Amino acid sequence: MLKPAVEPKAAAPPDPGGSDDRALMARVAGGDAAAFGLLVERYGGQVHALAWRMLGPAEAEDVVQECFTRLWVNAKGWVPVGGGLGGWLRRVATNLCLDRLRRPRTVSDEALAEHRDEAPLADAQLDAAHQQQAVADAIRALPDRQRAAIILTYYDGASNAEAASILGLGVKALESLLMRARQGLKDRLGALA
């Protein structure tokens, strides 16, 4: 059964006096499925609307099914009092809704989209931290101008022309400085591996 996207309307029972309900309940007590179907048709909308308002669409149908299951099971012991069958069904539905609201909420797999944890594993994080520290130490060990060239171009995002201007060099001289700096890092980091 499709769940409504808008709040359902409760249908008024056709027999407010309940004399027809008593006869149908007597038939249900005898196992008459057709009589049961008539009662579901008559009161199902009311019970569903009540449950929908209290719990929302996800659980409303479950409450309706459980409510009418109780009607079927308890038909022999049902006594018409107060609000009649409609009142009894509303009371049962309300209690079922309150029970659902009181119990601890669990999140089902259906409610959550499956997402892969993108965070690296702890050992990978430790390895990455060690590598970052080794690279930082290797950069600090470079001669000052090579270190400045690496930091300006790789970490600060300066173009070769900008870095050359900042260091007071020509672009070719900066590229030569970067080549020596990269070779120095490679030698130092290769020795650690």
Image (tube, rainbow, N blue to C red):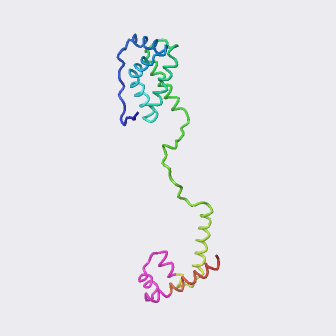
Left or right of residue 9: residue 190:
right
- Along the line of sight, the residue nearer the viewer: 180 or 35: 35
Which quarter of the picture shows residue 187?
A: bottom right
**In which quadrant will I find the C terminus?**
bottom right
From the top left corner, tell me how far across and down residue 104 is, in percent.
56, 36
Residue located 50% across and 82% down the image = 149
Left or right of residue 190: residue 11:
left
Q: Is residue 187 above or below residue 129?
A: below
What count of labels does the image hold? 0
From the top left corner, tell me how far across and down residue 141 is, in percent.
60, 81
Left or right of residue 95: residue 5:
left
Q: Which residues are magenta?
A: 148-176
From the top left corner, tell me how far across and down residue 105 is, in percent.
53, 38
From the top left corner, tell me how far across and down residue 78 is, in percent.
50, 14
Q: Was residue 87 drawn as part of the magenta stretch in this picture?
A: no
Q: Is residue 109 above or below residue 25?
A: below
Magenta stretch: helix, strand or loop mostly: helix
Q: Is residue 158 above or below residue 82?
A: below
Q: Is residue 9 above or below residue 137?
A: above
